[in-house]
């Protein structure tokens, strides 16, 4: 159990929240996404998405760009290099937990 | 977090990433309908003369327009079924990827008709379609990639075999090719429905 615990402790707490993990997963698959695209893909409310994006931006995981397209304001988000690295590390840790569990099952 | 939770989280992440970049509104029904229409179109030339440009244009024009209509209706229905909007970033990406081959196909269609060599068009259409399918393969289910490769091979073969076999090649490429794709998509749709049912019960 201690191996699991140490692996679990290494999981990025910011990404471990499912809303933020969903946002980062979506942004990892596309160069940039608009607020509407993210909201529709993830089925989140405007408020929820806004709060999570703000938190991710504060920690340097994403950049948020606000501009006008025609007369309409458009917010686009993009994963930073730091955010992508954190996401890759998070995936590596999850895979390590799965592998560790498999080894224990075979032992 | 245990092994099962970690594996489930990885699966959810994968689904989300696919959902972000994949076009998921292709329907089995539209593909099966397009395949059936193409085979009927090829069979129609037992009755019509393929060398007659009016008959050739009428039959394949009807097949193309009906298939396009079927795809349009199928996409709307699929969007409603899975609760997704039709005009999304993925739709725009797929259309953008298709535009060069559609444009080339259109120009070459006019060119070959103008020269009275319309029997070369099945090969041209298959090559353009294959190229378009491969261009969209990054955003589409894997079946599309295979259909693209098959169309490119059949298109090239159609030129090798000559105009005498062009109608039969249309039946094989657009007809059988779409039927195989349709059955593949059908099994995927059934799997998805079963998963949705399982999740709604669980």
Image (cartoon, coloured by chain):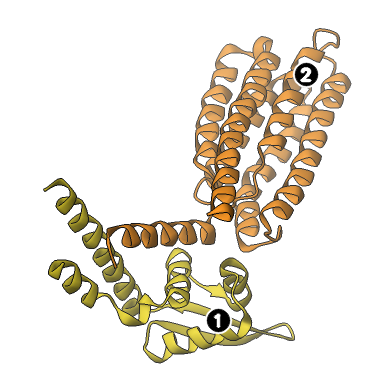
Chain colours: A yellow, B orange
**Label 1: element kind:** helix
Q: Nearer the viewer, residue A70 or A49?
A: A49
**Label 2: element kind:** helix
- The N terminus of chain B - image quarter: bottom left
Q: Nearer the viewer, residue B57 or A88?
A: A88
Estimate how packed mark 2 is, as few (under 14), some (14 to 19) or many (20 or more) residues with alpha carbons within 10 Å: some
Estimate how packed mark 1 is, as few (under 14), some (14 to 19) or many (20 or more) residues with alpha carbons within 10 Å: many
The correct choice, above or below, for B57 with respect to A89 in the image is: above
Can residue B50 be seen here? The reply is: no
User: Residue B129: percent from the left, percent from the top?
Assistant: 62, 36
Same chain letter for marks 2 and 1: no
The correct choice, above or below, for A6 with respect to B115 in the image is: below
The residue depicted at 64 percent of the width and 26 percent of the height is B179
The correct choice, above or below, for A43 with respect to B162 in the image is: below
User: Residue B43: percent from the left, percent from the top?
Assistant: 77, 13
Looking at the image, residue A98 sits to the left or right of residue B200; the answer is left
Examine the image and state in which quarter residue A47 appears: bottom right
User: Residue B42: percent from the left, percent from the top?
Assistant: 75, 16
Q: Which residue in the structure is indicated by mark 1?
A: A49
Looking at the image, residue A92 sits to the left or right of residue A81; the answer is left
Report the disc number at residue B40: 2
């Amino acid at each position: 159990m201690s191996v699991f615990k140490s692996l679990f402790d290494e999981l990025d707490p910011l990404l471990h929240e499912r809303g933020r993990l969903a946002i980062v997963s979506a942004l990892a698959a596309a160069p940039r996404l608009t607020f509407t695209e993210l909201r529709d893909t993830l089925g989140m409310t405007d408020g929820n998405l806004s709060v999570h994006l703000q938190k991710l931006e504060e920690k340097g995981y994403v950049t948020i760009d606000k501009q006008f397209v025609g007369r309409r304001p458009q917010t686009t988000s993009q994963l930073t290099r730091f955010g992508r690295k954190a996401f890759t590390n998070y995936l590596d840790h999850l895979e390590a937990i799965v592998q560790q569990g498999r080894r224990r099952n075979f032992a | 977090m245990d092994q099962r939770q970690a594996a489930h989280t990885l699966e959810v992440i994968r689904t989300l990433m696919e959902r972000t970049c994949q076009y998921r509104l292709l329907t089995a029904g539209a593909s099966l309908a397009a395949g059936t229409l193409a085979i009927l179109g090829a069979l129609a030339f037992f009755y019509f003369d393929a060398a007659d440009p009016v008959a050739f244009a009428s039959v394949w024009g009807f097949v193309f327009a009906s298939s396009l209509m079927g795809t349009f209706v199928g996409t709307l229905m699929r969007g409603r079924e899975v609760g997704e909007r039709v005009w999304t970033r993925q739709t725009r990406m797929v259309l953008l990827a298709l535009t060069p081959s559609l444009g080339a196909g259109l120009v070459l269609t006019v060119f070959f008709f103008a020269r009275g060599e319309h029997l070369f068009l099945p090969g041209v259409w298959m090559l353009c379609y294959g190229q378009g399918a491969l261009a969209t393969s990054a955003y589409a289910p894997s079946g599309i990639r295979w259909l693209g490769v098959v169309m490119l091979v059949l298109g090239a073969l159609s030129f090798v075999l000559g105009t005498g076999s062009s109608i039969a090649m249309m039946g094989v490429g657009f007809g059988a090719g779409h039927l195989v794709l349709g059955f593949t998509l059908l099994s995927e749709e059934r799997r998805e429905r079963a998963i949705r049912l399982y999740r709604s019960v669980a």
